[in-house]
Image (cartoon, rainbow, N blue to C red):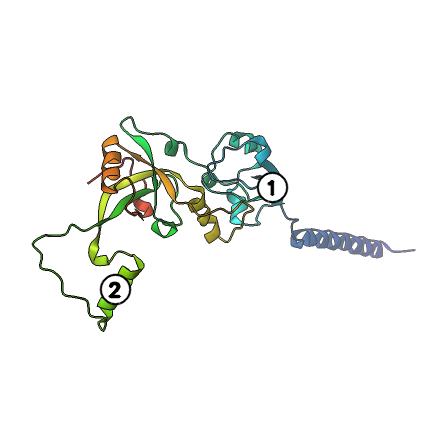
Amino acid sequence: MLERTDRLFLALAAGSGLAAAAFAYVYLQVKRPEPPRFVEITVAARDLKSNHRVTSDDLTTLRVPADATQLVANAYPAGDRDSLIGLQVGLPVPKAMPLLPGHFLKLQSLTLADDKVMMSIPLSGPASVSPLVAPGHHVDILVSIPKKQDQHTAKAPSPDPASPADYMRLLADRLGAPSTDAVQTITVLQDVRVVSVDDQIARSTTELLGISTDADDHDRAASITIEVSPADGTRLLDASARFRFPVTLFVRPESENSRPASTSR
């Protein structure tokens, strides 16, 4: 028979073994990596074009890892899906893209001051506008017009084909391109708020980000809608000879795009 001391020793050993097993179990639970956490977000159910008003069929939800990308962190959760119906898309959104606040036009970009009107203007081409221009930005509008010829100015000497500068002038004349000496660029309006942007200009923003869409390709158009006073609109029409002269935009820095009103100088 076991003596009392032996039984006590065996009991202590058994207790120590159970404690060690419990400690090992807790340790392994702590060290075991947690399973990834998933969230459900709202994404585009199909390609959405610029200026499109969102319907229920345009939206779907997707379950993704919570820490997948910053896009997921900033995306609208699935519970906000219905609140997006009726909003207007400011930039093209490809299918399955997480929907972000920046994809939609802000309410203030669709409202006008009491003394303002909306005016659509054609631009001279893609090079005349920053690819990042968007509704709400403020721009300066420049027009390139022919220089007035001074009747008292002495007649310029005949161009010398051996001179590089004269050769380029001759070449421009042959091609029908205006010489830089015959054109001047003037600033007609400053700090004008952009209300709407042509789809093809806005789409270049997603192209810069490397995001491709299935949207139909067409000839690249270039037009924007701006907020101006009637007097400023008339001034721009007169300066550009009803847009027969090239119109160019200077996009103001982001820090200046919060100015509430447009002015002309």
In the structure shown, which secondary structural element does the residue marked by tag 1 occupy? Answer: strand
Q: Residue furthest bottom?
A: 162
In the structure shown, which secondary structural element does the residue marked by tag 2 occupy? Answer: helix
Q: Which callout, 2 or 1, points to the residue nearer the camera?
A: 2
Q: Residue furthest left?
A: 152
Quick check: 137 left or right of 62? Answer: left
Say the numbered circle drawn on residue 170: 2
> Looking at the figure, which quarter contains the C terminus?
top left
Quick check: 15 left or right of 181? Answer: right
Q: Residue furthest right?
A: 1
Q: Residue drawn 46% across and 46% down?
A: 203
Q: Report the number of discs.
A: 2
Amino acid beneath label 1: Val
Does residue 82 sit above or below 14 in this rendering?
above
Residue 105, x across and y down, in percent: 43, 36
**Disc 1: which residue:** 39
> Looking at the figure, which quarter contains the N terminus?
bottom right
- For disc 2, the neighbor class at 10 Å (few under 14, some 14 to 19, many from 20) is some
Q: Quadrant of residue 141?
A: top left
Q: Quadrant of residue 158?
A: bottom left
Amino acid beneath label 2: Leu
